[in-house]
Image (cartoon, rainbow, N blue to C red):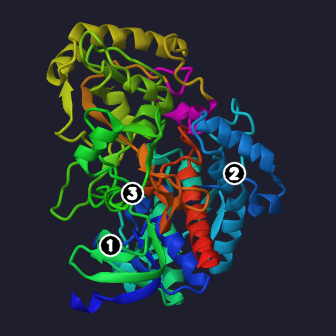
Amino acid sequence: MSRERGEAYDTIVVGSGISGLSSALAATELGQRVLLLEKAGKLGGGTCLSYGGFWIGNNHMAEQEGEADDLEQVKTYIRFVAGGYSDEAKLTAYAERAPEALRFFERCGIRLHITRGLTDHYWDVGPGARSSGRHLDPDLTPIADAGAWRDKVFIPRDQPVEMTVEEVISWGGITDPDNWDWQIINERRRQGILGRGTAVVVQFVRELLSRGAEIRVDAGASRLLRTDGRIAGVELQNGGQILARKGVILTTGGYDSNHEMAEHLEGLPGWLTQFPDTLTGDHLVMAGEVGAQTRTIHNNFSIFLGFHVPKERPGDNILFRQASICEMLCPHTIVVNRDGRRFGDEAYFQDLVPRLREYDMKTRRHPNLPCFLIFDQQYADAFSFAYRPPRTPIPEWVARAGSVEELAGLLGIDGAGLAATVDRFNGFARAGVDEDFKRGAASWTLASAKPWMDKGEEEQLPNPRLGTLRVPPFYGIELHPSAFVSNGLLTDANAQVVHQRGLPIPGLYAVGNAAAHTEYGIGYQAGFSLGSAMTFGYLAARHMNESN
């Protein structure tokens, strides 16, 4: 499109997830002329697939509700979660400036609220942890707020996006749709009212449009432009060039859907993406061409196990079921390796992560990859599988058999090993204590377990995370690793991309999954990803304004 050659803005933002939307809104509110570019045909990226939660310690909302926090405790907790892999300057920036960013976006019209029922993941063991007040959820938002762009917001298929996180928790969790208030959900669907990550995206799009920011979809960037050593704009995939007087903010997400790049940088066989197919590592290519450093967060705990739900219609988006926080939390399930052996606490997915990286020198393989979710008809009758209601027939693409030995043969698992494991696990379930891996002992895994104590099961079992596998047919499916990526562009506390020589690259910023998560290191905590992305989007825009 020749009309785009030579156009000029103050700031160009590349990508439209929360990192891009917050960067663009902050820059616009600060008086900049902003262009937001999205490679896909719809806005929102991976944020629309998320639960939409923000983790912000020491925030004013909690203080107003009588739950005042302490900044030093916030830093202490993030350091614990980071596990020694954080950049202290970025960690401090996140802890200290996130409340400021929250107030800023609240003044812009973004509406969040405290999420009740969701604790810090390590609140009973991590120093500085709290049981409430740090998790924020977007208010329910009508899709109509996106105006003429309502059909350009990515709405994921099959997922209950009409619920808040607080409702998901209070209604029994994502795998217990029998307990959901379907009258409320169906009425919201009728009215086009959204929650979770889609609500976040709609709110930010609404505020950007009201301020006259320009948004373009189907507009991928392919190269950064430089003038006198400074990033001065982008070249589009169609060849057009657009200039940026203040700079470019890369918010393209990760490289999850670039299979070769993901397997190379993550080092885990069997990788599957959980994000849209447009997340192909464009930021690494573009910034690499101008000398940017990257950083890998080794031992990243943000690794999930799951599987793709096959497309039912030609236009369906990728749907990755995070079994780690769905099926694996429930009774009547186990996860085993090819030897038919369990290798961790299935109900606490971070317990499994280090074991996924193990490598056997003699056999020359990862002993715990591939791995498999095994469950029985008791699970199918009581809980949701792959977003389907309980008692819905398990789809044909899932292996099933009348015995665990026969199922093992279908999946390529050692039959004697699986039979022995199931027998041993059933004993643990009846006793209520997992003697091998202490499944169900971690307090966060019990947070949403109470409704499961009253499922009317034939056996009254003492531990809601343990349930026997004894009722055929038995089912199994291979699980694949996916992640909030471990590698990204190295950035400083202002979100500036750092050059190989150790100095910031003038005019170049990276936010969200495009940047290495050095603010919170190896750890996973719900809300860190969106919370830090919003914070550093705000800081990038402020730094641009103050330094140009």
- Please tell me whether mark 3 sits on a helix, a strand or a loop: loop
CA separation in Å, label 3 and label 2:
26 Å
> Going from the N terminus, do you reach mark 3 or mark 2 first?
2
Question: Label 3: which residue?
Answer: 291
Q: Is residue 543 left or right of residue 513?
A: right
Judge by depth and name the residue closer to the eye, 286 or 35.
286
| Viewer-proximal residue among 13 and 356 | 13
Which amino acid type is marked by label 3? Gly
Span shown in magenta: 443-465
User: Who's the residue at 40% across and 18% down the image?
Assistant: 343
**Residue 135 location (% of width, % of height):** 64, 53
Q: What label sits on residue 92 in the rendered view?
A: 2
Residue 176 inside the magenta-drawn segment: no
* Residue 89: image location, x then y, percent: 66, 50
For residue 342, the mark is: none
Using the rendered view, name the quadrant where residue 530 is placed. bottom right
Magenta span: predominant SS is loop
* In front of the other: 355 or 379: 355
**Which residue is disc 1 drawn over?**
42
- Location of residue 73 by image quarter: top right
Task: Evaluate whether residue 130 shows in this view.
Answer: no
